[in-house]
Image: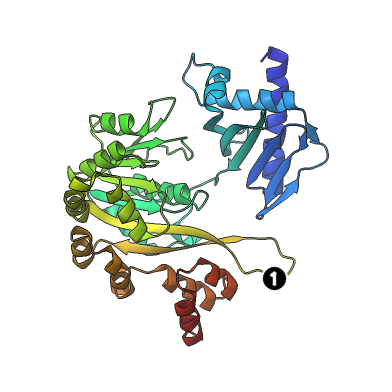
Amino acid sequence: MTHSLASDAIAVLHSLFDCCESTGASDIHLSSDEPVRLRIQGALRRAMPEIGTLSAALVSDIGMHLAATSLPEGVSPVERFQTTGSADGAVTSPSGKRYRFNVFRERGAVAIALRRLNDRFLSLEELGLPAELMECTRCPNGLVIVTGATGSGKSTTLATLIDAINASRDCHIITIEDPVEYIHASRRALVRQRQIGRDAPDFHTALVSSLRQDPDVILVGEIRDLPTIRTAITAAETGHLVFATLHAGDCTGAIERLCAVFPSEEQDAIRRQLALVLRCIFAQRLLPKRTAPGAPLERIACGELLFNTPAIANLIATGRSAQIYSAMEIGTKNGMRTLEQDLVRLVSERLIDDETALAQTRNREILRERLRTSR
């Protein structure tokens, strides 16, 4: 970009931030030769008229400006973008608000999606999450997994847990993220945050090197390949408390996915190892909240929570994952809950309707019966 184009792109970007923050929007969407759209209370709407339609050249300039913020010095965002077709990162607006972004190509043009992050670390209660999750922050070591689909709030949940440790423990926390979304200023803990692509080439390399940096707590933004999963389990086994995200639909699915990436001849050993190091799995979802007709759309958190009790550990070690769900259902005294139990709770509290609950369940007939008996 030339200096004038860069200045125009930055000025427009700052105007978009102002518009997003004044309207309470959660997301900004930019497309070439299209009106700017904002997601407000879950609905995608056109931005204020004064912003109007952005040209393909201007969207491209904004995209290259954003991409440059996520790359190491000396790396051309144009070359990287031409190679990969997308760029992830995070940026801070002039008002101090933090945004996560993805710049990508579509139909040969540049498009951009930005997500406004929370201004502060919310409590578990504010997020609508189980208070029992806080027990994970008190573990001296082990593996804690937060799982769910993209956009289900995993990063926000982990940020809340890391903030709780930062406020309460004298320890060294290392986060490995792509991108760094929430900035943690050191409080009682010393916090160091590494961004993939800028501070390290990939999750596995960053995780291996973190073990030589005297950490007590390690957050890995995502574990998805065999080397990273193996190193995360080893780190948990050697005295570190490891938090990580994983894409899986439920707690049992997370366990099976962790084990399935290993060669078949290793899976029995990995199950035994996982049974020893696993502390907790939380499978999170965001559901449309029940609102009055015409009211703005809202979302509410829902999920199932598994703690690795001796009974659960035995089922993991012996490969009897099919029985874990039943053990969770009778494990409420240990803080556990299944998805169906949480759906019944949300319906009983009139936070979601029956149709929303039935759309999420794995067994509609069982959930219908439980909803009938809960009334």
* 16 or 178, nearer to the observer: 178
Image coords of residue 54 (percent x, y): 77, 31
Residue 68 in view, yes or no: no
Q: What's the image's color scheme?
A: rainbow
Image coords of residue 348 (percent x, y): 52, 78
Vertical relation: 89 (above or below) 308 = above
Vertical relation: 225 (above or below) 250 = above
113 left or right of 201 in image: right
104 left or right of 4 in image: left
Image coords of residue 51 (percent x, y): 79, 36
Query: Which residue is located at x 57 percent, y 75 percent?
Result: 354
* 263 or 222, nearer to the observer: 263
Which residue in the protein does label 1 denote? 292
Local packing at callout 1 (Cα closer than 10 Å; few below 14, some 14-19, many 20+) is few
286 left or right of 158 in image: right
Q: Quadrant of residue 56?
A: top right
Inspect the image, locate mark 1, and give the three-letter code of the amino acid beneath it: Ala
* 79 or 42, nearer to the observer: 79
Q: Quadrant of residue 337?
A: bottom left
Q: Quadrant of the N terminus?
A: top right
Single out the residue that lies furthest toward the front: 264
Residue 304 in view, yes or no: yes
Query: Which residue is located at x 34 percent, y 57 percent?
Result: 281
256 left or right of 179 in image: left
Vertical relation: 335 (above or below) 240 = below
Mark 1 lies on a secondary structure that is loop
